[in-house]
Amino acid sequence: MDTTLLLIGATGMVGRATLGRALAEPLVKRIVAPTRRPLAAVARVENPVVDFAALPQEAPWWRADAVICTLGTTLRQAGSQTAFRQVDHDHVMAAARLARAAGTPCFVLNSSLGADPAGSTFYLRVKGELERDLRGLGFDSFTTVRPSFLDGGPRPDKRPGEAAALWVGRLLGPLLPRRIRPVPVDRVAAALLEAALAAPPGFHAVESETLHPP
């Protein structure tokens, strides 16, 4: 089957890894990657430049076989809780609603370990609320991937808290429970793409402990 993927968040670390994997997958014949800034031109990738606060309502590319969403920011980058929620919840929901209305049957989300509407931190609560609200849209297949800290090399933006956690995680390695070990970004990308291609019916959560190499 020739698969068309809609990749939301292709410029981030997980998004770039997912795009690379999708380009290497023979089953994926077309990738639509809407971004705020243009990507380098690549065969099989359509790259509409959009404003996520005012997404195009009638674009034909909202209809795909699956959406993979890796869109997200940090409180530090966003500058406020309101701005963070707008990116990590509202922009994602706006894209998901348009994809669902266009008939896209499958949605795959890069979420977070501990995502819970009643979570202990604002970050985890927003992630949990997003998962809850996406489930309410009624996709035939909805998978959320919940990695711990991401291990993918230096980021273009400074994240001192994440960097410290990664340093500890790499130092302690196998002594840590699998659930909280740093997760290689490529493993997250692989899980996202696998879920999009398989499109298992119903709701599925891929927890962090399952994302480590055997």
Image (spheres, helix red, strand yellow):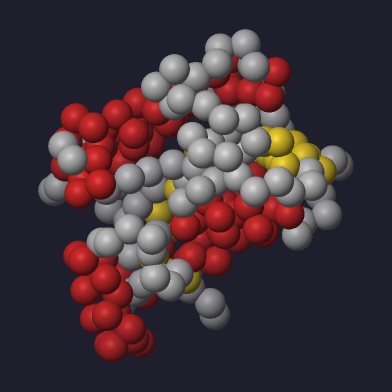
Q: Quick check: 102 left or right of 149?
A: right
**Quarter containing the C terminus:** bottom right
| Left/right of residue 96 with respect to residue 123 in the rendered view | right
Camera sees residue 147: yes
* Picture residue at 78% right of the left edge, 44% below the top: 44
Q: Is residue 23 above or below residue 138?
A: below
In percent of width and height, residue 80 lies at 16, 37
Side of 37 where 66 appears, left or right: right
Query: Residue 104, how many percent across, how many down?
Result: 65, 25
The one nearer the camera, 44 or 63, is: 44
Relative to 67, residue 177 above or below: below
Q: Position of residue 160 (x, y in %)?
A: 21, 66
Residue at point 69% right, 53% down? Answer: 22
- Report the residue at 27% width, 53% height from top: 114
Query: Is 94 situated left or right of 202 in this image?
Result: left
Q: Residue at x 77, y 56 (%)?
A: 25
- Residue at far top of view: 58
Up/down of 154 relative to 118, above or below: below
Q: Can you give x and y, in whole percent of width and height, for residue 53 in the image?
A: 39, 22
